[in-house]
Amino acid sequence: MSVTFRFASAAELEEIVRLTGHSFPGVGRDPESWMHRYRETSYGDGPEILWVGEESGRLVASCQLHRITHWVSGAELPAVG
């Protein structure tokens, strides 16, 4: 078996929240806080920059990317991190 990575869909947010809560438990990290984080990040990117890993039709990983800007020799270089 192998993991396939792709952009997440909005319909998968509840499953992503479950997976994230399991992986990163803690005070203030309840399902509502994770859902808010994925829907409305401080970067304003929302779920379009959320990747998931899928194996045999089941979500097994997620990764949220944020748009950032690097400056190289005075030139703006858009990136994600």
Image (cartoon, grey):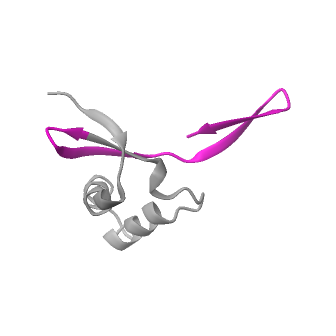
Lateral position of residue 9 relative to residue 57, left or right: right
Residue ID at (29%, 43%): 61
Instruction: Count numbered badges in the picture.
Output: 0
- Where in the figure is residue 76, as x and y percent of width and height? 78, 36
Residue ID at (55%, 40%): 81
In which image quadrant can residue 38 be found? Answer: bottom left
- Where in the figure is residue 8, as x and y percent of width and height? 36, 49
Query: Can you say whether 65 is above or below 1 in the image?
Result: below
Who is closer to the viewer here, 71 or 50?
Answer: 50
Residue ID at (55%, 56%): 45
Residue ID at (23%, 44%): 60
Q: Is residue 40 magenta?
A: no
Which span is picked out in magenta?
A: 54-81
- Where in the figure is residue 47, as x and y percent of width and height? 44, 56
Q: Is residue 80 magenta?
A: yes
Quadrant in the picture for the N terminus: top left
Query: Can you say whether 19 is above or below 37 in the image?
Result: above
Which secondary structure is most common in the magenta stretch?
A: strand
Q: Residue furthest right?
A: 74
